[in-house]
Each structure stands twice: as structure tokens, then as C-alpha cells.
Image (spheres, rainbow, N blue to C red):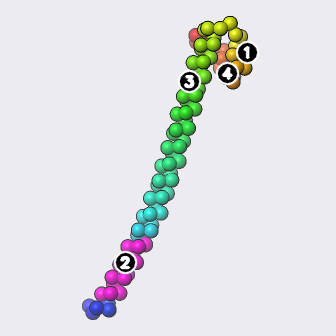
């Protein structure tokens, strides 16, 4: 194989490497995006769960330590009355 053919082959290999790097980079970006999306969903779910637990604890304290009606507690906490009633039966 002559020098011209070798140079042509090297350029073809370099081009193939650049294409492969571009494809790999695009794939990595997609994967990273999906991972970030899943992490954000997981964090949002955990935050929602924690907030629900905190609201329940507040409702329990209000039911235990005050004379407020379930309606008043629901109004103060933003927790549905049915949930306050359910928590009350569990206290």
C-alpha cells in the first residue's frame, strides 16, 4: 500500500472515530437527561411523601392537643376533612 492510500485510510479512520465520538456523546447526553429526569421524579415523590407525613403529624397534634373540630383542623391545615377524620379514628 502506498503513502497516498495509507493517508486516505488514516483520514477515513479519523472520520469514523469522530462520528463514533459524536454518537457516543449524543447517547451519553440522552442517558444523562433520562437519569436527571428520573432523579427529579424521585426527589419530587420523596418530598410529597415527607410533606404528607408532616401534615399528618400536625393533624395528630391538633387533634390531641386542642379542642378544634375536625372541620377547623381541615381548614387550618389544608388537609381534606375525610383525611382528618381518618387520622382521628387512628389516634
Q: Please, what secondary structure does the residue beneath circle 4 have? A: helix
Our reading of the magenta stretch's main secondary structure is helix
Would you say the residues marked 1 and 4 are in contact, meaning their CB atoms lie under 8 Å apart?
Answer: no
> Which residue is more in the foreground, 53 or 76?
76
Instruction: Identify residue for label 2.
Output: 14
Q: Please, what secondary structure does the residue beneath circle 2 have? A: helix
Gap between marks 4 and 3 measured at Cα: 13 Å
Q: Please tell me which of labels 1 and 3 falls first in the chain.
A: 3
Q: Is residue 42 above or below residue 35?
A: above
Q: Mark 1 or 4, which is nearer the eye?
A: 4
Q: Mark 2 or 4, which is nearer the eye?
A: 4
For mark 2, does the 10 Å Cα neighbourhood hold few (<14), some (14 to 19), or many (20 or more) residues? few
Instruction: Write the start and end of the magenta stretch as one range.
Output: 6-19
Gap between marks 2 and 4 measured at Cα: 65 Å
Which residue does the image show at 57% across and 18% down from the upper left? 57
Q: In this view, does 77 lie to the left or right of 5?
A: right
Numbered tag placed on residue 77 in the rendering: 4
Gap between marks 1 and 3 measured at Cα: 19 Å
Numbered tag placed on residue 53 in the rendering: 3
State the image coordinates of residue 6 (x, y, percent, origin top left).
30, 87
Would you say the residues marked 1 and 3 are in contact, meaning their CB atoms lie under 8 Å apart?
Answer: no
Instruction: Identify residue for label 1.
Output: 71
Q: Please tell me which of labels 2 and 3 falls first in the chain.
A: 2
Which residue does the image show at 47% across and 63% down from the upper left? 26
Would you say the residues marked 1 and 2 are in contact, meaning their CB atoms lie under 8 Å apart?
Answer: no
Q: Please tell me which of labels 4 and 3 falls first in the chain.
A: 3
Amino acid at each position: 500500500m502506498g503513502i497516498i492510500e495509507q493517508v486516505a485510510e488514516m483520514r477515513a479512520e479519523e472520520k469514523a472515530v469522530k462520528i463514533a465520538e459524536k454518537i457516543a456523546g449524543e447517547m451519553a447526553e440522552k442517558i444523562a437527561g433520562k437519569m436527571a429526569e428520573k432523579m427529579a421524579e424521585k426527589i419530587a415523590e420523596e418530598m410529597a411523601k415527607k410533606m404528607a407525613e408532616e401534615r399528618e403529624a400536625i393533624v395528630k397534634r391538633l387533634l390531641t392537643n386542642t379542642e378544634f373540630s375536625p372541620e377547623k383542623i381541615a381548614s387550618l391545615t389544608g388537609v381534606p376533612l375525610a383525611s382528618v377524620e381518618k387520622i382521628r379514628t387512628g389516634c
